[in-house]
Image (tube, rainbow, N blue to C red):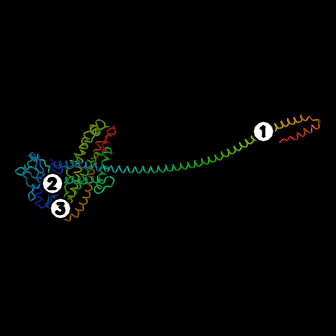
Amino acid sequence: MLLEINPLVLPDIGLVFWNTIAFLLLLVVLGKFAWKPILKAISDREQGIEEALAKADKMKADITAMQNENEALLAKAREERATLIKDAKEASEKMIADAKDKAKSEYERIVADAQVAITQQKNAALTEVKNQVGTLVVEVAEKVLRRELSNKAEQETYIKQIADGVKLN
Amino acid sequence: MANDTTAVATQHVAKEEGSFNVTETILEHIKDDHSWHLWGHLSISLPVILYSPQGLEIFSSSHFLNEHHENVVYEGKQNYKLFDGKTKVVNAAGEIDMAASKKLWDFSITKNVASLFISVFILLLVFLTASAAYKKTGIKTAPKGVQSFMEPIILFVRDEIAIPNIGAKRFARYMPFLLTIFFLILTNNFLGLIPLFPGGANVSGNIAFTMTLAVCVFVVVNLSSNKNYWEHIFWMPGMHWSMKLFLAPIELIGVFNKPISLMIRLFANITAGHILVLSLVCLIFIFKTVYAAAVAVPFVIFIFLIELLVAFLQAYIFTMLTAMYIGMASEEGHHDHHPAAEGADKELAHH
C-alpha cells in the first residue's frame, strides 16, 4: 500500500491514544484551573479599568457641573443681593416719603383743627358778646325806665353815657 | 522513499562502504522512536506497552537491543522485534508474522509520547503558576513574571483569533479549547526545534499528533454547528435547485476537508522545516569536508530563525482556522434572527 511506503504519513495508534489523553487532560485541567481564572481575572481587570475610567469621566463631569452650579449660585446670590439692596432702597425711600406725607397731613390736620377751634371760640365769644349785649341792653333799658327821665336832653346824654360804657371787648 | 527491505539493504551497503545515506539519517531524526537518543551511544530507554490477544505487556525498550546496539528479538508472550522503528511479532525463524502483527496494538511511550508528556508538564507548570499569580496578586496589580509573559499571548488568542472569528457573543465558551490547542502546538513546535533533550522529538510534525487535534476540531466544530450551517451545506439558500444539488456534495466534502487541511498543513510545515535544517546539516557529510559547514551553518541558522517564526505562525494558523470553522458552523442566519437564541448565547458568554 502507498501509505505503508512512507512511514511519515502513517499515524501510530499509540501516539493518537496518548495524544488524545494528553489533550483532554490539558483541556480539562487547564480549562478549570488556568484558563477560566486567568480569563476571568483579565476580563475583571479590563472591566475594572473601564469602570475606573467611566468613574473618572463621571467625576470630571460632576465637578464641571458643580462648578457651573456654583457659578449659577453665585450669580443668583449676586442678583439677589442687588435686588435686596434695591428693595431696601425703595423701602427706605418709601418710608421717608410716607413719613413726609404723614407729617404733612398731620400738620394740615392740626392747622385745620386749630382753625376749627378758633372759629368755635370766636363764635362762642361772639355769642357771649351778643348775650352780654342783650343783658346790657336789658339792664340799660331797666335803668332808663327806672329813672323816668325828665328831660329829653338829659335822657339822650344818659343813653349816650351808657352806650359809651358798653365796651365791646 | 524506499520500502523496508531496500531501506535495510541500502543501510547495509552504506555501512559497508562507510558512506552516508541522507534519506535514512533525516527520516530517522523525523520519525518516532522507542528510545530517546541523547548523544554518542547514550540513549534513554522508554517503556514499551503492547496489547495483543495474549494480554497487556510492559517492558523496557532496551530489551530490543543487545550490548552492541543491534536489533534483537524480545521474548515476551510472543516474540517481538523492531522493524524500522515499529514493533512487529516475529516467528521462530525471525520473520514478521503479519497476521499476529495486525492484532498487535502498540501503546508504547515512544520518544514523541514522552516529549508530548514533557510539553503537557511544561504547560501545566506555566499556566497553573500564572493562574496562581492572578489569584495571589489579584487584579489590581500589573502582571509579573510568567504571568506578564503569557497574558499578551492569551489576549492575542482572545482578541485576534477568537472574537473576530467566532463573535463577541459566543467566543467565551470556546476559549479554553482554542487556548489549549494554541499553546500545545506552540510548545511542541518549540520543543521540536531544540536539538537536544528534552527537545528533539518531532511531535507537531507527526501525522498522528496533527490528526488527533484535527479530529478534536472536527468534533467541536460539528457540536457547535446549527441549522443554518447545515442548510448552507445541503440546500444552499438563494440558488437554483440544480445548483443546490450540485453544491451539496462539494460542501459536504468541505466539512471533512477543513480538518484534514488542518492536519496536513501543520504536519507538512513542521516536518518540512525539520527536513530542511537536517538537509543543510547533511551537506557537510555529503561533501565530506568540514568546510561545507561554512555554507551550511549560516543557512541552518537562517532557516532555524525562520522556523521559530513558523512555529508561532503554524500554531496561530491552526487556532485561527479552528476559530473560523467554529464561527462558520455556529453563525446565525442573516434572514432569521432568533432573539431567544441570542439571549441564551449571551448568558453562556457570561459564564
Q: Amino acid at mark 1?
A: Ala
Taking the image as shown, residue B27 lies to the left or right of residue B179, namely left
How dense is the environment of label 2, judged by Cα within 10 Å: few (below 14), some, or many (20 and up)? Answer: many
Q: Amino acid at mark 3?
A: Phe
The residue that mark 2 highlights is B33
Q: Is residue A157 above or below residue B177?
A: above
Q: Is residue B38 above or below residue A153?
A: below
Q: Horizontal and vertical percent for residue B123?
A: 23, 53
Taking the image as shown, residue B64 lies to the left or right of residue A142, namely left
Does dot 1 land on a helix, a strand or a loop?
Answer: helix
Does dot 3 land on a helix, a strand or a loop?
Answer: helix
Q: Horizontal and vertical percent for residue B147?
A: 29, 55
The residue that mark 1 highlights is A124
Pick whichever, A113 or A122, lies toward us: A122
Of the image marks 2 and 3, the number of the one nearer the N terminus = 2
How dense is the environment of label 3, judged by Cα within 10 Å: few (below 14), some, or many (20 and up)? Answer: some
The residue that mark 3 highlights is B285
Residue in the picture at 19% in, 61% down: B283
